[in-house]
Image (tube, helix red, strand yellow):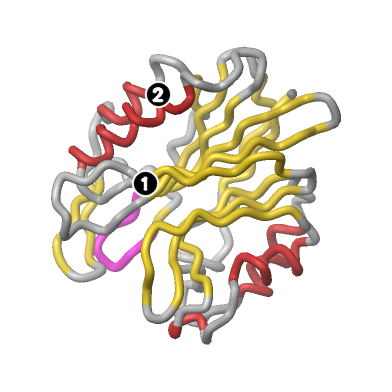
Amino acid sequence: MVKDWIGKIDVRRQAILLRKFHPDVIFLQEIDMYTKRSYYRNQLYLLSKYTGLTFRAMGTNIKYKNGFYGDGILSRFPIEYSANYLSPLTDSSHEQRGILCNKIAFGNTKINVFSVHLSTFEEERVLTAKELLRITSKVNKNEPIIIGGDFNVGIKKIGNHKYLYESKTSYPEYEILKEKFKSINNSEITWRSKESNACIDSFFYSKHLQLLKQETIKADISDHYPIYTEFLI
């Protein structure tokens, strides 16, 4: 759910900050649509309105409190195709996550962007990483791919909305994705909670793309810091 650090929903303030970076595409996770806790508003529409990115797509992973919950993509350019794939589960009681795929048209150039929010269980994260490789293997080899979002690496759920982070020298879900993609060199804290602080958000991208810039935006608009990236397409 999109909320600020003190727990109040303020989509407009989040959008105003993001707009300062003049983004072409925004990868979103934990988006509410018409849920009770979001005051029955469509958060994706509001973010689209306030950022000025008129093209949008939502991947609904679960029904929640009279509405829907999942991931989103906002784009300055037309979205030609959108599909949401449900992530593998090892237990039906675990929260359903998703892989939101969108094909965006930059003139004659097509780019495939994936907004992801991986599980808080490592085994499911590994399965999702393998599923990402399977899905992206179907993409035209001439079309770039960018995968961004909350990968939850090292995270372990310890209670209701409580999580601990275990730092490791490498994470199996990342190593799987690195078989096919490059990743940003990100080690700054991107997630904060009362229990842990950690770097769990990242981007992976086609090996022929050139990363021009990356920045972790230290702003208290969420329990995650946004990551800004620029690519030469």
Q: Which residue was labeled with disc 2? A: 133
Q: Please give the range of residues in magenta.
A: 192-200
Q: Which three-letter amino acid code belongs to the residue tagged 1? A: Leu
Question: Which residue is the site of mark 1?
Answer: 86
Query: Element under label 2?
Result: helix
Check disc 1 and report its element: helix, strand or loop: strand
For disc 1, the neighbor class at 10 Å (few under 14, some 14 to 19, many from 20) is some
Q: Residue at x 40, y 30 (%)?
A: 132
Q: Is residue 17 left or right of residue 29?
A: right
Foreground residue among 8 and 130: 130
Quarter the C terminus occupies: top right
Front residue of this view, candidates 38 and 231:
38
Query: Circles 1 and 2: CB distance less than 8 Å?
Result: no
Q: Is residue 66 left or right of residue 123?
A: right
Structural distance between the alpha carbons of marks 1 and 2: 14 Å
197 is within the stretch colored magenta: yes
Q: Amino acid at mark 2?
A: Leu
At label 2, counting other C-alpha atoms closer than 10 Å, the crowd grade (few under 14, some 14-19, many 20 or more) is some
The x, y position of residue 92, in whole percent, is: 17, 55
In this view, 133 is above or below 58: above
Write the residue at 25% across / 51% down.
120
**Which of label 1 and label 2 is nearer to you?**
1
Name the quadrant containing residue 166.
top left
Q: In the figure, 227 relative to 210: above or below? A: below
Quadrant containing the N terminus is bottom left
